[in-house]
Each structure stands twice: as C-alpha cells, then as structure tokens.
Image: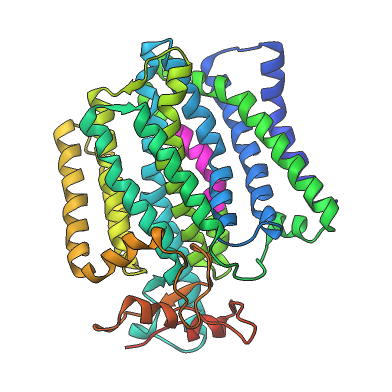
Amino acid sequence: MPAPLIRRILLCLAIAAPALVFRVTGFAPNPVVDLVIFGAAVVAASFVLAWAAEAAQKDISGALAIAILALIAVLPEYAVDLYYAFRSGSDVAYEQFAAANMTGSNRLLLGFGWPLVVFVALFVARRAAKTRGLSGKALPRALQLPGSSRLDIGVLAIVSILAFTIPLMGTIAIWVGVVLILIFVAYLWRASRVPDDGDEEFVGVAALIADMPQTKRRITVVSMFVASAAVILMAAEPFATSLVDSGSSLGIDSYFLVQWLAPLASEAPEFIIAVLFALRGMGAAAIGTLIASKINQWTLLVGSLPIAHFFGGGGADLALDPRQVEEFVLTASQTVMGVAILLALRFHRWSAFALVALFTVQFAVTDTTGRYVLSIIHLVIAVGLLVVHRREIVPTLAAPFRRSQPEHAGELAGAGVASVGVLAEVPAGISADSAGSAGVSSDNSGRAGHDDSALLRNVDHK
C-alpha cells in the first residue's frame, strides 16, 4: 500500500478513534462534546468511504458506478435519518426529526452543491480560454451535459412529481415508501444497462488506490468500505442523539441542528468529490454524481423512513407535522426547479446564481407563509423554464423507459459521466442535442480530452 495512502487513512482513523473510545466505554461528558467527537468521526469515515467509492469505479465502470458512488457517499445521512425514523416508532418526540435531515440535505445538495460545481467548472474553462486569448462573449457561460444524462433527469422529474403526494397526504405512507424503493431499484437496473464510456480517470487518494495491483486494490477498497461503514454505524446513534441534546443545552432549535449541521457533516466528502471532478475538467460527471445522490435521497432514503418507523414500533405511516409538511413542499418545489433548469442539458451560470440566491433566502424567511411563497417562486420559475424548453419535456420523461440511450456524435455514454462540456452563450435556435454534441470533445479512441485545448474546442461561440 502506498505510503501517502497509509498516512491519509491513519489520519482519518486517528480522528475517529476518540468516538470509538467514547462508544466502547460509555463515556459521555456532555452533549456538545459528544456532538464534536462523534461528528468528527462521521466526517472522517465519510472521507474514507468516498475515496473507496471513487476508486471502486476502476472495477465497476459506467453509469451504474455513478449511481453506486452516489449511494455509498450518502450512507452517513442514511444512518442518521433512519435512526431518527426508527426511534420515532417508540418516541413521538423524534417524529419531527425523521425527515428533517433529508429535507436539509436535499436542499443543500441542489441549492449549494449544484451551483458550486457549475462555478468551479466554468472557472476552470474560462481560465483556460483566457490563456488562449479569448475574452468577452467568447468565454464559457454554461455547463453542457450529454444527452445520456436524460436518464437521471427523467427519473428525478418523475420522483419530484410523486414527492408532492407526501405533503398532500400529511404522512409518508408505507406504500409510498415501497413505490419509491422500487423506483430506486429500477433506476439502478436502467443505469446498469447504459453503455460504458471507457476508462475512468482518478486523482488524489483514489488514484493511489486505483494504481494498485488488482487483488490488493480490491482488498483495500473492501477493507475501507467495511471499516468506514462500521465507524459510521457506530457513531450514527450518539451523533444523532447529541444533535438533539445539544440544541436543548445551547438554546438552539434542535430541528435546525438536525436539518443543517448533520447534512454539512455527511455531504462534505460528496461535495469534495464533485469539485475534484469539476477541477479536472469533468463538470458533467460532477453534476451527474450529485443528481444521482438526489435521486437516492428522494427514493431509497425517503422510502426507507416509514419502514424504519414501522420496525421501530410505529404504525404503517410516518406522520408529518405542519412544519415537516412545509419543508417537504419547499424541498419538492426546489427539485422541480432544478429539473426544469437541466431540461435543455445546459446549466447556465445565471441558473446557478438563482439557485444559490433562493437557497440563501430561505434562512431569512422562517414563517410558514413565507416558505410557501418561496415554494411558489420555485414553481413559477420552473413553469417558465418548462415553457421555454417544452420540446425537451417528452424526451426527458421518456428517457427512463427507453431501451437504450441515444448516441450523438462526440457524446460519451453514461448517466452524467462525460467530459465537461462548457459552452459560451448558445445562439437562439440551436437545439439541446446539437449543443450537446458541441459540448463534448473526444480523441480518436473516443475518450474525452481534458486539456486546455479540449476545453476550448468545447466552446460554442456566437
């Protein structure tokens, strides 16, 4: 095993070690200390998990790898959320926290994660363009996605529509949970049938693992999976409990800590992976990973909550109070807006600014009426985008049901796995698919080029 890899793993283990001691000995000085100790363990284990998941693409490539990577990356969130749902079965006080982590993480992912990737990808491409003497309108202004991304966008569109049934019913019915889990299974099956795009590129810790001989690499990846998952599962309960108790001891709304502090800890490694993709000229792959994570949250995670609640001693339905209903409406409306932005397979920088702005505003708008007004704003923007891109609606909704994804010239197959396509302002009249082929370059072997010249060839000028 390479020395740099050993050093990084040992560092993460050292950070997680105090949590292991606390858990084994039962030592718990106070909720705030517990929160720091167990939270640090979750973050450290999440990084190890993320490194192993990315390196695993060496042996599991293609769209399925992206889906699995996204699933593994959100394991910390699953552990915390499912604990709250399970505990709510015997303690009514925990019902309010069951979906809090999910709604916060979901909105953080779309309102902050997606724009962050776009900004980083465009920064890299614009810097490359400037070194070539380009300026003004010739500089990239949008991130291009491949046509094969319609699979993920289509699934997310269907799920976002179904999501509105939850606040309308005021509960997460167990039958809805089963339907969402079945959608997730179908999504994985469809992703597994998307053609492979060739060898994956690796950087950082993942590159160190990927360069190892096959047998040692697989043993290392499996060991990292097992060790990190064990730490996360060990720390999940005390971390979740300390979040609630810390809020009471510090005079901070416990719901706020559960909804935002926990997701910050669990999503950090995922955001870092996405940013690394964008920094190496793979913005479309970065967005693809985050879209897949959002699908996982809306299907497998939400679908598992009523089941965990049932096995924890609760009924067949997980009841939502008025606050949770409003949170679900806000989260679902934001998702619809995100889908509408991606319909044309072009993520413009102004769309990223709009997502960040609306995400930030929600922290100032705390009353119920304001939240519903914000949800309406999401939907109004979404309707406007749907009208503009109305020709893309049917192809997007049909994508999850097609037997095979369309192949366009220069396009890399794979749900969200592609060379970054960074475009200048696209002239009116250019279709999304023709823009897609302009947004991805490839060499003679069909693999994407990521150097400055390739980035500039991906720019469509007015």
Q: Determine whether, in the image, residue 162 is placed left or right of residue 299.
A: left
Query: Where does the image place residue 60, in percent across and percent down from the top left?
Result: 66, 57
Which residue is more in the foreground, 210 or 399? 399
Asked where in the image residue 361 lies, by quadrant, the reply is top left
Question: Measured along the vertical axis of the image, is residue 401 above or below residue 44?
Answer: below
> In this view of the protein, can residue 244 be seen by the observer?
no
Query: Where does the image place residue 449, in percent across and percent down from the top left?
Result: 59, 79
Which residue is more in the foreground, 118 or 62? 62
Query: Where does the image place residue 29, in percent across and percent down from the top left?
Result: 60, 12
Q: Determine whether, in the image, residue 209 is placed left or right of residue 107.
A: right
Question: Measured along the vertical axis of the image, is residue 438 above or below residue 320?
Answer: below
Quadrant of the image containing the C terminus: bottom left
Q: Determine whether, in the image, residue 48 is placed left or right of residue 276.
A: right
User: For residue 267: magenta?
Assistant: yes
The stretch of residues the image draws in magenta is: 261-272
User: For residue 430: magenta?
Assistant: no
| Residue visible at 64% across and 54% down in the picture | 54
Question: Measured along the vertical axis of the image, is residue 30 above or below residue 104?
Answer: above
Q: Determine whether, in the image, residue 72 is placed left or right of residue 363.
A: right
Which colour style is shown? rainbow
- Characterize the magenta stretch by its predominant secondary structure: helix
Q: How many marks?
A: 0
| Residue visible at 47% across and 89% down in the picture | 133
Query: Where does the image place residue 2, in percent across and percent down from the top left?
Result: 84, 54
> In this view of the protein, can residue 18 be seen by the observer?
yes
Q: Residue furthest front?
A: 403
Asked where in the image residue 340 lies, by quadrant, the reply is bottom left
| Residue visible at 51% across and 60% down in the picture | 286
